[in-house]
Image (cartoon, rainbow, N blue to C red):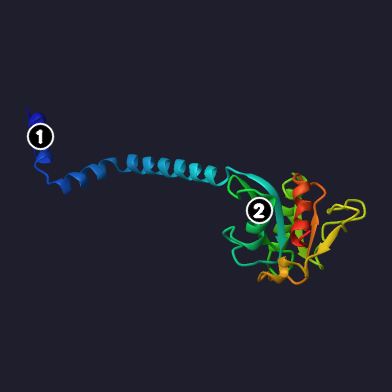
Amino acid sequence: MFKKNTAKEQKTSFKELSFGQKVEYIFGYYKYYMLALVIVIVTVATFINAYRRNDYTAECNIIVVDGKMTGYDDRSDYITQNFATYLGIDNNKHRVVCDYNYSLIQKDLDQESYVSQTKIYTLASTHSVDGYMASTDYIDYFSTDEEPFLEDLREIPIAVNLSDTKIKKDTDFTMDEPCYGVVVSAENRENAIAFIRFAFDL
């Protein structure tokens, strides 16, 4: 009899709570379930957003070593925008991907050069890089006599110096004496070669 009265009192007391008190009571009771639901929603939203951002075809992947220009971090840089126009692509579903986040300059207690080197080797071995841009000091960094990194195009040198082109003259590109070559494992070889024509207005 005592237990029944207690249960009845609890029900009555909950009904008499104010709206804010009821919310506080429910949140306190279900907070772990609600937290789990929020985590699930955030995870799904993140996955969908990542999928949408990566739902495109890369028509030319260019790696830039130790050089940046305005817009490099949001795809509004001169190369990404203007080379896409040159190729006649929308740069949305079909894109020029120009990645400036690499450095081969070795610094004490800094692993960035090692990480960049490893990433470039990996991308090249998986046919995920088409063009390679670096200064004269690093343009042949990955090439050996036994295993060339850049393609010999015969009519066009293995790497071309872009210092006198619009890539350097018409931008605030920070790289001194930029050079460019087509990677031997390029999946988009023709577009990688087309970049040379674009740079020299050919």
Q: Residue furthest top?
A: 1
Q: CA distance from mark 2 to mark 1?
A: 74 Å
Where is residue 185 drawn, in percent x and y? Answer: 80, 46
Quick check: 185 left or right of 83? right
Q: Position of residue 135 (x, y in %)?
A: 78, 67
Can residue 140 be seen here? The reply is no
Q: Quadrant of the C terminus?
A: bottom right
What's the residue at 33%, 39% (across, down)? 33
Q: Amino acid at mark 2?
A: Ala
Q: Residue at x 66, y 52 (%)?
A: 96
Mark 1 lies on a secondary structure that is helix
The correct choice, above or below, for 22 with respect to 157 in the image is above
Q: Is residue 196 left or right of residue 8?
A: right
Q: Nearer the viewer, residue 10 or 167?
A: 167
Q: Secondary structure at mark 2?
A: helix
Query: For the residue marked with disc 1, what is the amino acid?
Result: Thr
Rendered location of residue 170, percent (x, y): 68, 70
Q: Which residue is mark 1?
A: 6
Label 2: few (<14), some (14–19) or many (≥20) C-alpha neighbours in 10 Å: many
Q: Which one is nearer the viewer's eye here, 92 or 67? A: 92
Q: Nearer the viewer, mark 2 or mark 1?
A: 2
Residue wearing tag 2: 84
103 or 16, nearer to the observer: 103
Q: Is residue 34 above or below residue 121?
A: above
**Quarter containing the N terminus:** top left
Whether residue 84 is visible here, answered yes or no, is yes
Which quadrant holds residue 131? bottom right
How packed mark 1 is, by other alpha carbons closer than 10 Å (few <14, some 14-19, many 20 or more), is few
Q: Nearer the viewer, residue 14 or 164?
A: 164
